[in-house]
Image (spheres, rainbow, N blue to C red):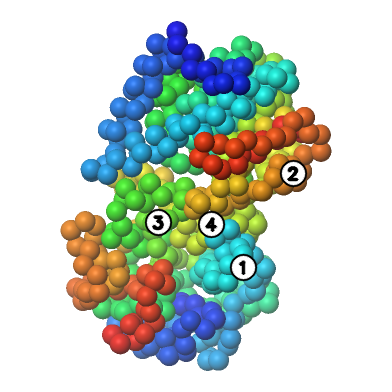
Amino acid sequence: MIENTILCVKWGDKYGREYVEKLKQQCEENCSVPFNFYCLTDKKEEPYDILLPTTWDKYEGLHSRYRNVQAPSNMWAYRKLYMFQLDKVVGGGGWNVSETDFKSIAGDKFLYLDLDVIIHQDLKYFFELSMARPWIVRGWWNDTNECRKNYAAMKSTPINSSVIRWNRSQLVRVYDHIRKNLDVLFFTYPTIDNYLNHFWYNMWYEDLPEEELAKKSDFNIFPPGTIYSYYRGNTWPNDVEEKKLRPDHKICLFNNSAETNDVEELKSLW
Amino acid sequence: MVSIAEDGYNVHLKFTPKLANDWKNAMLASSELAVGNYQYLTRRVLDSMNASQLESKLWLVSTLQEFDIKPQRVALLAGWFAQYIVPLMFDTFPECEWIENFEIDHDVTPISYKFNKRYKDENRYKINMRNVMIKPLKFRQNPNTPIPKEDVYDVIINCACEHMYPMWKFREMNNAVQRNPLLVLQSSNDARHDDHINCVQSEEELIDQARIKHVIYSGTKLLPNKSIRFMVIGR
């Protein structure tokens, strides 16, 4: 059985099927270890598709930022957290979401990738990480002062959920935490990154030695030089040039809070 | 001693030498904790000290006094730096034993403890990093006092209801472990700020949100920043 599994989420119409296919192709070209590939989606079309649950749909638009406005909420991104329930061995019982085929997802080492990424280097790196804690993107391009200043306002989060690496069952408690507090969380946190930042990461202790930090933050963070942002840069304050590809890094993100037409811009770079 | 008195209020913030010393050290710490040349923390401290902040707290404490309410053990929800409410409470209500401030912002702890060092040193002021909409208040039985754990807090103050989920959730979550404490709630109609996620338009809406059945007081106040503040006291 192949233990490495790459997951993505396609929900709604922002990204077409070609983004999933392109991501799959990039993985095949840039991963030197065997892997399973699945797309969690609201519309099954391909053999690798897994149907997303709809349990949380009723919370769409609950946050004040989206109430009384026509703009789409960032609820779609929350849906990626369904995958954190992957805690049981294949064929095992006790699944929380019986309406989906999540239990057919194979593998024990999971790597989640947003659809809007460019992979530069071998993904094997992610499957060989020490897994005492799961890993998530640290937006090194952010000014830490801004992150701390905006902590209550829930802007400028230091972490970014575009790439997450975890082992089976490692994030079940995050999933359970969400499941138990759905009304409060969807009302309070406009994005998944705000939520993860408030409950599962602690930027105030980033300078602590690893053994101390491990007690304070549930997530480990990919080090500088691993993942960067096409629109925000690489590391604050010395390397923040925008719209620059850095092929010596592993992955390029296209997080820009929908401020520009990133969909077309990314396509032009394929 | 200098009293800063606002017209119409029967309570004053007593500007004592001890308060001056604590506040000086807090302001100094806020500037030293700022990383680099962007002194965001100093700015936040100053925001927490504006006229509207003071007026809201004077209104709250003054109203408690008017209704002869004598808080003893106070849970202060999302109290921020709490440099106004804590001395106002202790100065106005001699029977007030202690105040516990439940916060989520880690920057608050070192600064708030400096603002209120004189009370912290006497074990009368404590900060607890806790999201009160996710976890119930934590009750530690003090073997030196006869207070039953279901009656640890006789008054719950929340001057930041606009920052969080409606208060019925807090009540429901703490119902099993807390007898019927008095709720003192403030909220705002000021939706200009990103972190004001739950503004209300009337005191009735605030009452509804907290599912208060017995209202002792409800009122509104136009603040110097032109926003309207609502206050409700009840159970």
Nearer to the camera, A44 or B167: B167
Q: Mark 1 lies on which chain?
A: A
> Crowding near pointer 1: few (<14 within 10 Å), some, many (20+)?
some
Q: How far apart are the two marked residues, 3 and 4, measured between alpha carbons?
A: 12 Å
Residue A180 lies in quadrant: bottom right
| Residue B149 in view | no
* Side of B197 where A117 appears, left or right: left
Q: Residues within 10 Å of mark 3 (few under 14, many from 20)?
A: many
Q: Chain ID for label 2?
A: B
- Same subunit, tags 1 and 3: yes
Marks 2 and 3: which is nearer the front?
2
The label on residue A191 is none
Disc 4: which residue: A189
Tell me the residue that label 3 is attached to: A157
**What is the x, y in percent for residue B163?**
56, 46
Both on one chain, marks 1 and 4? yes
Q: Residues within 10 Å of mark 2 (few under 14, many from 20)?
A: some
Q: Residue at x 54, y 72 (%)?
A: A72
Measured in 3D between alpha carbons, the distance from the residue under mark 1 to the one under mark 3, in whole angstroms, is 21 Å
Screen quadrant of the C terminus of chain A: bottom left
Task: Give the mark toward the camera: 2 or 4.
Answer: 2
Q: Do labels 1 and 2 share a chain?
A: no
* Percent coordinates x, y for residue A9 in the rendering: 49, 77
Q: In this view, does B104 lie to the left or right of B37?
A: right
Residue at image point 69% right, 45% down: B202
Looking at the image, tell me whether mark 1 or mark 3 is earlier in sequence order. 1
Indicate the amino acid at tag 3: Thr
Say whether marks 3 and 4 touch (CB < 8 Å).
no
